[in-house]
């Protein structure tokens, strides 16, 4: 048997890493949508900023500002998801999979991992990456909701 009971064989780990990389690559879709919403919100803020005076208009401007903020947060998560996708591709290619502690040491040296962190198994890394992707998508959903609400307030004006 090539693997221990708690750790799948390397070929299974490589396939799991490749699948995770493919899943994380899908983070580009919400990132593109969020970028469009962010640019739209900024343009509307530039246009509406001088027009604020009514309560509805002020609320719309605040919602647009919230949309821009959510777009910036989404951008951070998109960066993290893209970085993790590249790492999982390296794991799938076998350049880092046999030596996860060396990967952790590299991340620590670059300041991307806390010094006190313990080594994590591949499954925990996948769970963490999936959480980042979910957070990225939630930022997009909230950003879209803020834009829709702002449009509603603008329509009432």
Image (tube, rainbow, N blue to C red):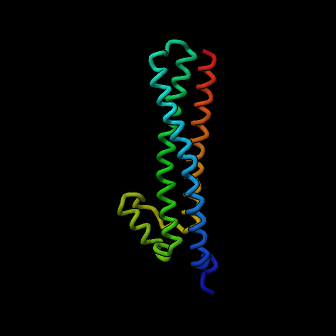
Question: 92 and 114: which one is in front?
Answer: 92
Question: 153 and 123: which one is in front?
Answer: 153
Task: Single out the residue that lies furthest toward the left.
Answer: 109
Q: Position of residue 28 (x, y in %)?
A: 54, 51
The residue drawn where x is 47% and y is 71% is 100
Query: Quarter-wise, where is residue 103 in the image?
Result: bottom left
Question: 147 and 100: which one is in front?
Answer: 147
Relative to 63, say whether 144 is above or below: below
Relative to 96, say whether 149 is above or below: above
The residue drawn where x is 51% and y is 73% is 93
The residue drawn where x is 39% and y is 62% is 108
Task: Single out the residue that lies furthest toward the bottom.
Answer: 1
Q: Position of residue 63 (x, y in %)?
A: 55, 27
Tally of numbered discs: 0
Quarter of the picture containing the C terminus is: top right
Q: Position of residue 95 (x, y in %)?
A: 46, 74
Relative to 144, say whether 113 is above or below: below
């Amino acid at each position: 048997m090539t693997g221990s009971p708690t750790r799948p064989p390397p070929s299974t780990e490589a396939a799991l890493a490749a699948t995770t990389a493919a899943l994380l690559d899908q983070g580009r879709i919400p990132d593109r949508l969020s970028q469009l919403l962010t640019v739209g919100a900024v343009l509307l803020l530039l246009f509406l900023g001088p027009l604020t005076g009514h309560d509805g208009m002020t609320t719309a401007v605040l919602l647009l500002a919230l949309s821009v903020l959510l777009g910036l947060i989404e951008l951070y998560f998109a960066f993290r998801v893209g970085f993790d996708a590249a790492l999982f591709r390296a794991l799938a290619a076998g350049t880092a999979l046999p030596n996860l502690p060396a990967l952790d040491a590299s991340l620590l040296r670059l300041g991307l991992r806390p010094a006190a962190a313990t080594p994590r198994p591949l499954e925990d890394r996948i769970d963490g990456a999936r959480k980042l992707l979910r957070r990225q998508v939630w930022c997009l959903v909230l950003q879209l909701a803020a834009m829709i609400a702002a449009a509603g307030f603008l329509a009432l004006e």
